[in-house]
Structures are given as structure tokens and as C-alpha cells.
Image (cartoon, coloured by chain):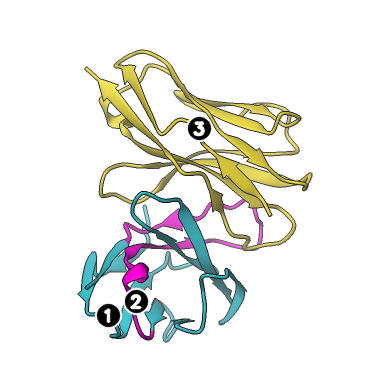
Chain colours: A cyan, B yellow
Amino acid sequence: EPEVTQTPSHQVTQMGQEVILRCVPISNHLYFYWYRQILGQKVEFLVSFYNNEISEKSEIFDDQFSVERPDGSNFTLKIRSTKLEDSAMYFCASSRDSNSNQPQHFGDGTRLSIL
Amino acid sequence: AQTVTQSQPEMSVQEAETVTLSCTYDTSESDYYLFWYKQPPSRQMILVIRQEAYKQQNATENRFSVNFQKAAKSFSLKISDSQLGDAAMYFCAYRSATRAGNKLVFGAGTILRVKS
């Protein structure tokens, strides 16, 4: 069965550095998402992306964050200048079409550790 | 804004027994979807079961079933004949049906431990 894949599985970065988290959504999916989970807390929505533009973003997704689909397969989350509080598990997800009962399929996540 | 509450941080069940995980939610919308996701340790979240709010019939998927009480805004998950492989974090999630590509709103999760 097709899967959402995320790389790297663990990223360690110095505070203030830029980081790019990568995701390959399922190939025929049209909607893409990023969520994050700070240790011990809820999974929180960051951003959704459709037709090469952001369709919705949360208040967490400030100017330090950006998303991009640079080619036909990858979907990236960039954090421009990382802060300690950006340490979290970041999950990418994708869903198939515009029918909103379609489930979102999640990747394994990238654990981001900011030192 | 919608919220999802899972009041049980952790639950235990004996293998082959039945366990129920609780979930309540708050919304002013009438049309939405509810989901249970399972997250094994260090693994991706997998959809277990989903329920459309307009359907009165409770969803079932093999050993997994839900008790959907729309008026009470309750959506519990029942796991029958529990197996060791059911041990995981379980997340309840809400999704508005007002438009396509809507975000999921998650509860805090319940850790399920299965004893042999």
C-alpha cells in the first residue's frame, strides 16, 4: 500500500539555523498537510496546501515557516531561524481529493531537536 | 473553534478482553467527520475507523467499533478481543465537512497497554 514518506527521521539543529523537513506524499493525492507534536502535548495543525498554495494555516505557522512543493513529488516544510520551542515531532499527511471525508494518510514523522 | 477531549491518558486491557476509549468533542457545526487514529511506538499514525456525523449507524471495522452519540458529542472506540498488536497511542480527531482539505483537530491521545 502506498505510504507517505518523511526524511530525515531525526534532525538535530543549532538554534537560529534553518531546517528543511521533507515529505513525499502519496502520488495521486492532491491535499498536503503539516502537523507537529511537542513532546507530551497534542498533535497540532500547522498548514494545509492545495493546488500549489496554502489553503489554511494556524497561528503557529508564522513568518518563520514556509512550505513548498518544488517538484511533482516532494512537499517541504522550512523553518527559517529555529527556536528551542520548535523542538517537536513533525508529521506530514496527504489526502486524495476534494471529498472531505477522505482520510489523511500520515508519514512516520521527523523528530526535530533544537540545541 | 472545535475541541476534542480524551479524558483517559492511559488504559490497560487483558489480551482477548474488550476495552473502550472515550472521546468527547465540542462544535457548533452539524456536518463533520470523526476519526480514530492509532500510532504504534515510533510508527506512523494509521486510520482505524471513521464516522460521518450525518449517519446514525455506528461505524464498525472488524474488532473496532464506535459508539457515536451526536447529541452528547461523544465518540468512543470499542476494541473487542484485544490483541498485543493493539498496543499503541490512540487519537480521536474531528474534521469539519464544510469544505475540502480541512484540517484534523486532535485529542491529547490515550495510551493503550495490552497485557498478555
Q: Is residue A6 left or right of residue B116?
A: right
Question: In the image, which residues are magenta?
Answer: A80-109
Q: Specify the label residue B7 is tagged with.
A: 3
Residue shown at 30%/23% (left/top)?
B83
Q: Amino acid at mark 3?
A: Ser
Q: Amino acid at mark 1?
A: Met
Q: Give the spatial CA distance, label 3 vs label 2.
A: 31 Å
To the question of a shared chain for discs 2 and 1, the answer is: yes
- How many numbered dots are placed on residues in this image? 3
Whether residue B96 appears in this view of the structure is yes
**Is residue A93 within the magenta segment?**
yes
Chain bearing tag 2 is A
Q: Nearer the viewer, residue A26 or B97?
A: B97
Name which residue lies at 45% across and 51% down: A42
Image x and y of residue B43, in percent: 29, 49
**Number of the label disc, if any, that sits on residue A83:** 2
- Please give the residue where the numbered disc 1 appears in the rendered image: A15
Tell me, yes or no, whether the two marked residues, 1 and 3, touch with CB atoms within 8 Å: no
Q: Circles 2 and 1: CB distance less than 8 Å?
A: yes
Q: Earlier in the sequence, mark 2 or mark 1?
A: 1
Say left or right for B43 vs A95: left
Q: Quadrant of residue B16?
A: top left
- Report the chain holding disc 1: A
Q: Secondary structure at mark 1?
A: loop
**Could you classify mark 3 by the number of other residues whose Cα lies within 10 Å: few (under 14), some (14-19), or many (20 or more)?**
some
Residue at image coords 37%, 61%: A4
| Residue B60 seen in the current view | no
Q: Amino acid at mark 2?
A: Lys
Q: Quadrant of residue A90?
A: bottom left
Secondary structure type for disc 2 = loop
